[in-house]
Amino acid sequence: MSATTDRPALRLAGVSKSFGPIEVLKSLDLDIRPGERHAVIGPNGAGKSTLFNLISGLFPPSSGEIYLNGRSIAGLSPHRINRAGLARSFQITNIFHRLSVFENLRIGVLARHGVRFGLFRSVAAMRRVNEETAEVLGRVGLAARGDDLAGDLSYSEQRALEIGMTLTTGAEVILLDEPTAGMSREETAQAVELIRSVTVGKTLLMVEHDMSVVFSLCDRVSVLVYGNILATDIPTRISANRAVQEAYLGVEAA
Ligand SMILES: Nc1ncnc2c1ncn2[C@@H]1O[C@H](COP(=O)(O)OP(=O)(O)OP(=O)(O)O)[C@@H](O)[C@H]1O
């Protein structure tokens, strides 16, 4: 294979993060392959959110490097990382409740085209932005809700809208933070299908506690425990891994 096809979509090399005296992430190495769906699992406080915060640019790492398609992004602002091709949806809903569903999605499309609201003059450009917005609206199953206020959507519809907002920017690498948290079994199944369909051809990194979601959606799993990656493997081997069972899945060693 050529060097280009071997190159990870996302690479963490020796990434550490400390808050004061506490080292929350300890020299992590992790490669996310282009096109894979990869879950990060681990107990509460393991450092999963911190990991996502570093990758998406909320905090700089204390040391180490993060590469997006081979380009160093460690320490860049969230905006610049987004422009470089990485979008993140948040565990806490991050939508504009008093704008319509369509308007929420259009913000990302406008940002992608570098269009400022007040300078928006071209009818043709407006039509194109609206078409792209409508396309994403349909992909996330909200075509019938476009004119409704985002605040009036159900919880699972709001999560679908958030996923749509990551798509509008055209990012190739998508980070989802617990996308099925708080959902019923039926809503979770729908969310899994949605995530599967919208991430075709993209790279997905997700924090997910629900192992059935991880098993049905993800190609590989990394287990984060006390700021270290204990194992990275395909889901069946992760669930059979004795060290993972002891550290995370709560199984006693025989
Ligand atoms: N901004 C911060 N300042 C100080 N400590 C922090 C900060 N953010 C996270 N921490 C600490 O880092 C550790 C890891 O937290 P983090 O939220 O990354 O874990 P997590 O694996 O996402 O947990 P959960 O599953 O509960 O969300 C915790 O001890 C937390 O208190």
Image: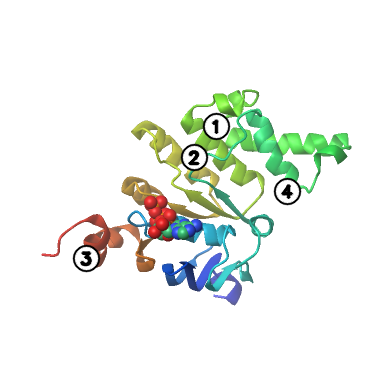
Query: Horizontally, is 124 left or right of 193 in the view?
Result: right
Are circles 3 and 1 on residues that touch, CB within 8 Å? Answer: no
Query: Which part of the image, by quadrant, shows the N terminus?
Result: bottom right
Nearest to the eye among marks 3 and 1: give it. 3
- The residue at 69%/56% (across/down) is 83
The answer to which of 243 and 76 lies nearer the viewer is: 76
Which residue lies most toward the right here? 121
The answer to which of 232 and 49 lies nearer the viewer is: 49
In the rendered image, the vertical position of residue 139 relative to residue 204, given as above or below: above
Residue type at mark 2 is Leu
Q: Quadrant of ligand 1?
A: bottom left
Residue picked out by circle 3: 242
| Among numbered discs 2 and 1, the one appearing first in the sequence | 1
Q: Residue 121 location in percent, x, y? A: 89, 37
Question: Exactly how many numbered labels are in the figure?
Answer: 4
| Among numbered discs 3 and 1, the one appearing first in the sequence | 1
The label shown at residue 194 is 2
Q: Residue 49 location in percent, x, y? A: 46, 55
Residue picked out by circle 4: 112
Nearest to the eye among marks 4 and 1: give it. 4
| Among numbered discs 4 and 1, the one appearing first in the sequence | 4
| Among numbered discs 4 and 3, the one appearing first in the sequence | 4
